[in-house]
Image (spheres, grey):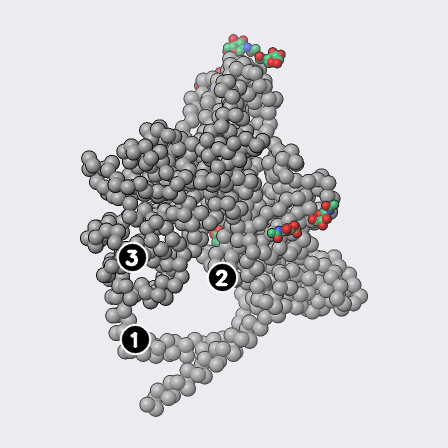
Amino acid sequence: MKSIAIMLTMHLIILSLLLFLKLSSTSAFDTVNQGSSLSVDEPKDIIVSQNGMFCAGFYAVGENAYSFAIWFSEPNHQTKNLTLVWMANREQPVNGKGSKLHLLHNGNLILRDTDAFHVWSTNTVTLSSVHLILLNTGNLVLQGNGVTLWQSFDFPTDTLLPQQVFNRHSKLICSRSETNKSSGFYTLYFDNDNILRILYDGPEVSSIFWPDPWLTDWDAKRAGYNNSKVAVLDTLGNFSSSDDFNFMTSDYGDAMMQRRLRLDPDGNLRTYSRKQSGQNWYTSWQAKSRPCRIHGVCGVNSLCSYYSNSVKCACLPGYKMKNPQDWAYGCEPEFTLSCNKTASRFLIITNVELYGYDYGILTNYTLEQCKDLCLQLCNCKGIQFTYVKDGTGIPGTYSCYPKMQLRNAFRIPYFNADLHLKLPVNSTYTYTESMDDKYKLVCSSNLKTVTLATSYTKFREGRYIRFLLWFVGGMGGLEILCIFVMWFFFVRKKQKTSRTATRVYDMVGFRKFSYSELKRATKSFSQEIGRGAGGIVYKGVLLDQRIIAVKRVKEANQGEEEFLAEVSSIGRLNHMNLIELYGYCVERKHQMLVYEYLENGSLAEHIKSSRLDWGKRFEIALGTAKGLAYIHEECLEWILHCDVKPHNILLDSNYQPKVADFGLSKSRNRNDPKFSSFSKIRGTRGYMAPEWILNHSITSKVDVYSYGIVVLEMITGKSATKDVDVGNGQEKLGLVMWLREKRNESISWVKEIMDPNIEEGCDENEVETLAEVALQCVEEEKDKRPTMSHVVEVLQKISRENDNQESTSS
Ligand SMILES: *[C@@H]1O[C@H](CO)[C@@H](O)[C@H](O)[C@H]1NC(C)=O
Ligand SMILES: *[C@@H]1O[C@H](CO)[C@@H](O)[C@H](O)[C@H]1NC(C)=O
Ligand SMILES: *[C@@H]1O[C@H](CO)[C@@H](O)[C@H](O)[C@H]1NC(C)=O
Ligand SMILES: *[C@@H]1O[C@H](CO)[C@@H](O)[C@H](O)[C@H]1NC(C)=O
Ligand SMILES: *[C@@H]1O[C@H](CO)[C@@H](O)[C@H](O)[C@H]1NC(C)=O
Ligand SMILES: *[C@@H]1O[C@H](CO)[C@@H](O)[C@H](O)[C@H]1NC(C)=O
Ligand SMILES: *[C@@H]1O[C@H](CO)[C@@H](O)[C@H](O)[C@H]1NC(C)=O
């Protein structure tokens, strides 16, 4: 007893000692006064804003290289990296020993390197007393007598924070890479014509690529008449600029979000958000949905292709990387072209678009004439030959673009243009798609660090501090030992039993629930979240805190045995685009299914909202197709959904789709000859294939039809269950009929049918491809419709999926 009492007292002493040390070492301050300084040698010389959200201090940009910076206090949850928002000296880091930030008595704030050399200063002068304060908004302000002499918000680097006004003098310049923080090649600025633009200013050429350079200001929905040149992102996520450019982030309205707008090293402008509780940043808006359209992204003489959200660069055949560590420098030829017409040949690479650097646009040239012209021009590097369809049934026209430089080459399957590359006649270069994988960045680790020349003697800790550290360390060790002993005797036994319980649970995964358990979880079925033909769905929380959706199957649908047989076959399905079934309940007359709960509800709730930008809609179309292809073709039993509609496509927190309610449609063995016999019509008006009404045999093509309708709804933002007003007092048409007429009537039909919510940042060719596929899916004759797996193939070709994502999907 006595020894325990001594132990407890010791504990208390040690704990309070530790607490004291900790408190005294993190005494945060938000203000620096006149005459004082911050030193790079003192890790605790950090200014913290009063709300604790931002810090300012020395940030290590490389080995023994520091910049004075402002960052979000809370590191990124996943990578543990700090999120920088501002830097004083991005081009010229200072030494890790002896460098200081001084607030001088004359009001000047200066950053001195070890050798007392001024690296940076605010150039302010005042007679009054001044102080430097880090505000809760992340703005570092130099104040004298209540007057702002200087503020970091006026000199942004690559990031704009909420409420930070971007004006005629501001520029966002991206950093060179995620690890090299010096200035990169992209700049966001207000141009002389009052329009907000992004400029690529590369090693050899410069060009503007945002807004899209082929659009007039008017078509890009920008106004050049207002010369106030201001733009600001507010705390709710609304960005508005004086050139009429506005957007709302996908999570608009939540004032508790931390937000930032950054011009990223890849040239894209994005907003990021995260909850204040220290989660990961996610992208809540981006300017360019197709990164390959960002100029200079792969450098000169290279080919950009796109998958998932990133780009893949490759040199054109006959060219090699100039700097194997950096795509910005592109590729250089391995050959020399002779000016003699007979000394060159052409190599075709299909589906390539190259922006800019044309000799001219020649609209009535044949391919032979076009090649001939290029051969005559000594500096012609190749030609882009484009086929332009017009919808009136007349064969399309060809356009010839002789290219004087090969830049911004972007390979999109289904783009009606080919690159004919000019090469020496006796060379043997060929192109295959797999060549694109040949080029991987050579990542040498020494790229990450800047080592400055000067070296320093090691910092000598005071003897007293060393003793204290030893003492506390020793005591800490003793404490750990005693906690371990206690844990061994009292806790371990108990833990062992609970651990085996969870292991059993994990192995089974799918299980049976009791009625009372589900009643308790759903608080007596009080929170209804959905209602369909099959039954009502309620929200609930299990004892292990998992949130669930419980579906009560309408009573007396089928016998218990039949229900169990179906449930167990659904329970075996496992695909990232299918909703997960946790289990079921059969008790007396109750039949219930327990599903995972998805926070974003169903596609039906979002289909008309601007929150679903084009990128998300495309991902939803692809994911849904994958889920359906899986239940049609990849799993053992052949299951039809029979009720594909937006209400049955649920969205997770990242807006990834999960097909739901494929539950109780009939599953049959593939070889069952009686497969076509369904006893009654299933489905929802507007989404049902004609076979149901015509009483033809029912195959997986009924789901393909419904899928096509859903995709057309996503593209147009119009409902399939309502007719479309044709205008001019004409009669109304169903959605599909309306679309077919539009396609036949005009070349720019895609533009006319598109939901205005997705126009910003979407790729028209991509929309057109998806619309064409969806229209095939809704053919009246089922044999003309593609299979779900064919749809997946086509969509995946448009947007090559990241291999990593693919491998986690199954
Ligand atoms: C995070 O930091 C690590 C090393 O410190 C670096 O390799 C990585 O690129 C960083 N990630 C980002 C997104 O900056
Ligand atoms: C966003 O800000 C602009 C300009 O202040 C304003 O006109 C617009 O109504 C705002 N949008 C919303 C949804 O608040
Ligand atoms: C110009 O833009 C500013 C900021 O958006 C706005 O306050 C002002 O009313 C605009 N002026 C005109 C003439 O539209
Ligand atoms: C071009 O090359 C061909 C064959 O190599 C040769 O006969 C011809 O004289 C050359 N023409 C010129 C202008 O050099
Ligand atoms: C193209 O058309 C113009 C007139 O429209 C004509 O003068 C020119 O010869 C044509 N060029 C070719 C290569 O057919
Ligand atoms: C192609 O021909 C040129 C001369 O016409 C010669 O110098 C070169 O070596 C040849 N290259 C190959 C790959 O045969
Ligand atoms: C960072 O980028 C700058 C500008 O391109 C370059 O001069 C510098 O060498 C780079 N630093 C490292 C460590 O690569």
Determine if the C-beta at disc 1 is less than 8 A from ligand 1: no
Give how far across and how far down residue 223 sits, in percent.
68, 40
Tell whether circle 2 marks a residue whose Cβ is less than 8 angstroms from ligand 1.
Answer: no
Residue visible at 30% across and 37% down in the picture:
700
Residue 96 circle label: none
- Dot 2 crowding, Cα within 10 Å, few <14, some 14–19, many 20+: some
Per the image, label 1 sits on a secondary structure element best described as: helix
Q: Please, what is the three-letter code of the amino acid marked with disc 1? A: Val
Q: Quadrant of residue 729?
A: top right
Q: Residue at x 38, y 60 (%)?
A: 539
Q: Marks 1 and 2, Cα distance to the nearest angstrom?
A: 31 Å
Which label is found at residue 592? Answer: 3
- Vertical order, 484 against 458 (above or below): below
Q: 195 and 226: which one is in front?
A: 226
| N-terminal-most mark, 1 or 2 | 2
Type of amino acid under label 3: Met
In this figure, which residue is indicated by the disc labeled 2?
A: 278
Q: Secondary structure at mark 3?
A: strand
Is residue 487 visible to the viewer in this orientation of the structure? Answer: yes
Q: Amino acid at mark 2?
A: Gly
Residue drawn 43% across and 75% down?
473
Q: Determine which of the numbered discs, if any, sits on residue 491 in the image.
A: 1
Residue placed most toward the observer, 273 or 132: 273
At a point 45% along the width and 37% down the height, the residue shown is 712
